[in-house]
Image (tube, rainbow, N blue to C red):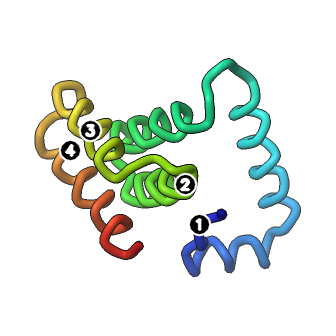
Amino acid sequence: MRAEFPKWTKHFQRSYPKVWKAFQKLGEECHSAGPLDARTRRLVKVGIAAGYGSEGAVHSAVRNALAEGVSEDEIRHVILLSITTIGFPNGQAALSWAEDIVRAK
């Protein structure tokens, strides 16, 4: 089950289909390049997005993780684990962004 893309992403896909296709291909290659299973990769992506501090990246990572069957509690736990590295305020922001997606589901 594929998560629904935000309005802007759909616009980008229509406006730049070749770029979008190349971006999707890069993502597929990165995901298949190593030994991690799909659930682990999705949890790692949530942690990376939280660490990066990007609301859009957290939204995307959480949508994809939920679509892969990752539980809401597992997503929250990954973000909680990030707090000692990225700081309390950044962790709180990431949790709030994750909850945006969890509540919308």
Q: Residues within 10 Å of mark 3 (few under 14, many from 20)?
A: some
**In the image, what residue type sits under mark 1?**
Ala
Tell me if residue 100 comes above or below residue 57 in the rendering: below
In the picture of the structure, the residue carrying the numbered disc 4 is 90
- Res 12 → quadrant: bottom right
Comes first in the chain, label 2 or label 4? 2
**In the image, what residue type sits under mark 4?**
Asn
In the picture of the structure, the residue carrying the numbered disc 1 is 3
51 left or right of 70 in image? left
Q: Nearer the viewer, residue 76 or 52?
A: 76
Comes first in the chain, label 1 or label 2? 1
Comes first in the chain, label 4 or label 1? 1
In the picture of the structure, the residue carrying the numbered disc 3 is 77
Seen at 26% across and 38% down, the residue is 77
* Residue found farthest to the right: 18
Residue 36 has which mark? none
Mark 4 lies on a secondary structure that is: helix
In this view, the mark in front (2 or 4): 2
In this view, the mark in front (4 or 1): 1
**Are discs 4 and 1 less than 8 Å apart at CB?**
no
Mark 1 lies on a secondary structure that is: loop
In this view, the mark in front (4 or 3): 3
Instruction: Look at the image and tell me in which quarter the C terminus lies.
Output: bottom left
In the picture of the structure, the residue carrying the numbered disc 2 is 64
Measured in 3D between alpha carbons, the distance from the residue under mark 2 to the one under mark 3, in whole angstroms, is 16 Å
